[in-house]
Image (cartoon, rainbow, N blue to C red):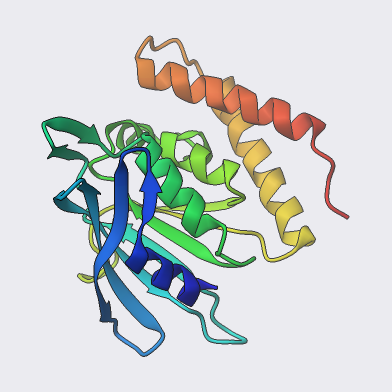
Amino acid sequence: MLEEAVKKMLDGISVDSFKIYAKKISKGRSEREVNLEIYLQKDKEEDSLLYIKAFNGLKPHYKPWVEFFNINNHLTLKGETVEYFDSILEGNLLNFFSRIIVPGGKIYIEYYQDEETLYGLSCGFPPVVSRLGYKLFALGFTWFKDWYFPEGWMEGGAKLQGEKPLDGEAKNRHIRNIHDEISLFLEKDQTDNKTFVARAVKRAREIITKLGVQKIVS
């Protein structure tokens, strides 16, 4: 499925008056890994949007994963200023790739230019209540890791990892951990009037409410 998604990106996906497509695809560090240079196009004008590295997995030990990095948050096309984070462009790309990530598969997203996510994770908020983490949770990712200090020199900047549960047992475990993390977060004094804090608290309460009515997977 990941291979099909890569081919689809060559043709591109339409988002409103824009087209998101892979201008160049190159081989990665192994035959199962590819690099995609993703561009945003409007009419005949285009600019680099981000890079994607995709690994197709290796059964039975390694699940597929996708990484978004070198994200260009501010673009100008045809006189129109476009911002990527928290936009319909981001939403469509995340939806597109999350659909083809199998249980146990992962997504990594560089966030150092994402002001709201950077603020929340820097303050120690649970990843799931960050702007980006909340989006990934809504797409079926239930385990998170904040790579705020990459180990080595090839991992790039700070990134958030989301992983889909391998099975029902894993999902139950992840959901319980999320519930506990958010409960502790909400018990703290959240009187800071900063917009980012207020949004994180709102997301936390929404998740708690959702988990309260969610049927546990058997």
* Quarter-of-image position of residue 109: bottom left
The residue drawn where x is 36% and y is 15% is 195
* Quarter-of-image position of residue 199: top left
Name of the residue lying farthest toward the front? 43
The residue drawn where x is 31% and y is 50% is 19
Number of numbered discs visible in the structure rendering: 0
Q: Does residue 12 appear anywhere in the picture?
A: yes
* Quarter-of-image position of residue 85: top left
The residue drawn where x is 37% and y is 22% is 196
- Image quarter hosting the N terminus: bottom right
Q: Is residue 11 left or right of residue 113?
A: right
Instruction: Residue 159 in the image: state x and y as whole percent.
Output: 34, 53
Q: Is residue 140 left or right of residue 171?
A: left
Q: Is residue 115 above or below residue 197?
A: below
- Image quarter hosting the C terminus: bottom right
Instruction: Residue 96 in the image: state x and y as whole percent.
Output: 49, 55
Instruction: Residue 97 in the image: state x and y as whole percent.
Output: 48, 59
- Taking depth in this image into account, of 150 and 87 the one nearest to the observer is 87
The residue drawn where x is 39% and y is 12% is 192
Name of the residue lying farthest toward the right? 218
Instruction: Residue 71 in the image: state x and y as whole percent.
Output: 23, 50
Q: Is residue 166 above or below residue 43?
A: below
Q: Is residue 47 above or below residue 84?
A: below
Q: Is residue 10 left or right of residue 163?
A: left
Q: Does residue 71 appear anywhere in the picture?
A: no
